[in-house]
Image (tube, rainbow, N blue to C red):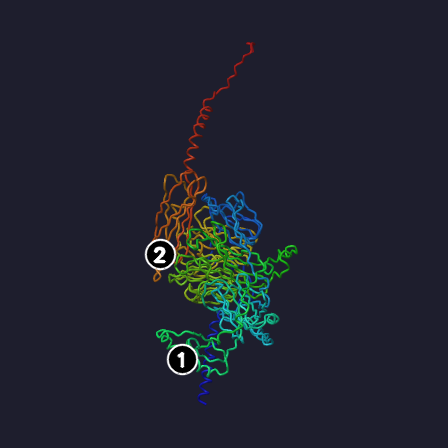
Amino acid sequence: MKSRARRCLLICLLCLTLSNLSYGENKFRERKATDDDLGYPEIDEDALLNTQCPRKLELRWQTEVTSSVYATPLIADINSDGKLDIVVPSFVHYLDVLEGADGDKMPGWPAFHQSNVHASPLLFDIDKDGVREIALATYNGEVLFFRVSGFLMSDKLEVPRRKVHKNWHVGLNPDPVDRSHPDVHDEQLVQEATEMKSSNTQTSATTTTPNVTVSMSKEFHGEASNVSSQEDQKKPENNQTEAGVKPTSELHNSSMDVRANTSAANDTTAGSTKNFNENVTTNGVDQSKISEVKNETVIKLNTSTDNSSETLGTSGNSSTTETGTSSGRRLLEDDGSKESDNKDNSEGVHMATVENDGALEADADSSFDLLRDNDELGDEYSYDYDDYVNESMWGDEEWVEGQHENSEDYVNIDAHILCTPVIADIDKDGVQEMVLAVSYFFDPEYYDNPEHLKELGGIDIKKYIASSVVVFNLETKQVKWVKELDLSTDTANFRAYIYSSPTVVDLDGDGYLDILVGTSFGLFYAMDHRGNIREKFPLEMAEIQGAVVAADINDDGKIELVTTDSHGNVAAWTTQGVEIWEAHLKSLVPQGPSIGDVDGDGHTDVVVPTTSGNIYVLSGKDGSIVRPYPYRTHGRVMNQVLLVDLNKRGEKKKGLTIVTTSFDGYLYLIDGPTSCTDVVDIGETSYSMVLADNVDGGDDLDLIVSTMNGNVFCFSTPSPHHPLKAWRSTDQGRNNKANRYEREGVFVTHSTRGFRDEEGKNFWAEIEIVDKYRYPSGSQAPYNVTTTLLVPGNYQGDRRIKQSQIFDRPGKYRIKLPTVGVRTTGTVMVEMVDKNGLHFSDEFSLTFHMYYYKLLKWLLVLPMLGMFGLLVILRPQEAVPLPSFSRNTDL
């Protein structure tokens, strides 16, 4: 009885432990975005407008562009004239450029293109002429380049379609990923996965066909798969989900090399929805019987790492019958041993022997004494040749070619770009690459046309949604590599789109840039510069719509990664994929967070917008909510929030101001420490981020707001301008989403950035490195500073004059740059990368030898003007009749 009681106690403790472990692994998926179901509070306009903390914004100008503005504009000096411009990507067909001083459209703009735009514009010199063109990623999978004059260049990047098997989806569960054990705590996902599992279990109970088990690695490298047979399906382990699969003889992913090894008349194939590491197990039964019944698929996201090539191998097991012969070795035996073996094998089993008619010499014969004594033979010699030889092995020895792929069995899915790409040299080869997160699908509106749908051969276009990361070499304009990620259908709970821009940052300090991207399939990927998935990735959440943020959020001097999802989960991870903290905000997070010290307490905060209208400020140390937040607006907040210092001259208030728009039609300016708010009624909704810089040429900071009605507003603030306050695009540099002012950055000093003309052989540019990190993290040195001079015009030398320097402490530095010997303009770009790989930049424009030619012009014009003036002065003062040659002298 005591032993039975102990056994029951142990079982209870084990069950309790397993339940606790299971609960601990179900974070993020067990939660729901409950706040999104609530209504928005009624707007008290009087209370909003009668604020206690007015910011005194003034409307400087307002301009209407050609269509709605969905993506965030870009502030830049595109023609090197020393004046800032606003590049506005209209949602449909047009790209506008506005002059920052008054909002007028620049000559030659808007420029027309044939697609829609979900991405912000970028600047890059694609033709190496010293002038940066405007790069625009379009909805139809192309990256276009526009000259500063508005001319659409013939150079462009075309993302290739993704090739998948036509029947990849046959028999698959709509959501083939196990979401019952996510990497975050989310009750909603676990509940949905449990319901799906129970329904699939009931379905599988009615079938007698063996199951197919697919194990998918979280590393997602697309590695080789091991296949073996089993009688019963293994029970799902952590990170597994069940989905019905109907195997077909040709079902496999387009990116996989399928190899089939058949035995005992067994032909089995397997398919996958992703490029994961797959281990497929199936019984050795006739494939035609398997294809008649839907089987159960268990997809496991495990944590092994493998960078082998993408292959999927299948094989079946054939049972072999062992003979009942003795295990003695019968080679090189003497007559005595033969006689003894004949007695032992009286049933007449044929023995394999070696005969030698001639006698061996004494020395040679003695060398076989050990082998003749069976008692002294090792176990490795104790086997019978006949036990391992089957005559069926020696059948048809002719080799057979593998089945060739039929192009009719595959579908090429259209490529679409739904987010802004990133330009960086990710592999240290000296050539810039463009990293694009690409979504593949067939546009329903386009294929509503029967003529267009006919081109696809009658397929169901809703069955093909995929995503990949595509890297272009910007020198050759060719695809460098493609990493295929997710694959799903349109009816799945999580679909394989990518709405968030990729983030590039050096995670391990090797100098190569890693690529971070979250997908709406609910997976967070981290891959190296070659596309190999890093260990412990991808991490599983709900649908990820916002970009992954890489920043030092807990002030330890190291990079952390912050992700958000559609269930309101916010998680902070180390660069190795280990969770630091997580929080549940109960509302969909449409954009990535912004980073900065909001309340001025000296600690970094994480600011998160939500569709419920709440704006949360979380502590970067532990994810706790910073009071008095959240601040609730009266509509959805769909854009990334701006963090900026709006203190007036002489004011020394701590903290930052949160600037954002809401779908209630107001522009909000929320004081960081107190959450006291001032609003501006713009009467329109906006998806794009509010930008900040000195665009009108004054000395104050301006705010740029663009709306879905196609209006662009410029508001001036009483706050003085500083280069580190500027926020010219969603990213400051290529990967920085943190406030730089009074934190970290590099800028060109006021004495240098003024528009001027340079002569002589050299000129000096003064920069200042700011790093106000505190103990214990200390400074982020060393600082690798690269200065690039872009020279357009008729200059015959190198159009990109570049030099790099490493500084070990913050402060002001002077950099000597060469002066070109021709009359032209120029742009100086200053880029800094700290020890964590965070990128900061600033730039200014200038001219070369313009004043000299102006002086020469006046030297030629002034003498002519002087002579003309002299003639005017010396002209007669009184009217004198003209001389007459008439002979009549009386007249």
Where residue 429 sits: x, y (%)? 42, 52
Which numbered dot is residue 781?
Answer: 2
Left or right: where does residue 723 sit relative to residue 251? left
Give whichever of 307, 577 is nearer the camera: 307
Residue position marked by numbered label 1 in the rendering: 374
Kindly identify the residue that appears in the image at 41 percent across and 37 percent down.
851
Q: Quadrant of residue 44?
A: bottom right
Report if residue 16 is visible in the image.
Answer: yes
Where residue 71 sits: x, y (%)? 53, 54
Q: Nearer the viewer, mark 1 or mark 2?
A: 1
| Furthest residue toward left | 808
- Residue type highlighted by circle 1: Asn
Marks 1 and 2, the one that precedes in the sequence: 1
Where residue 137 sits: x, y (%)? 52, 52
Instruction: Name the quarter where the C terminus is drawn.
Output: top right
Left or right: where does residue 301 sit relative to residue 464? left
Give whichever of 50, 286 is nearer the camera: 286
In the displayed structure, 249 sits above or below 140; it is below
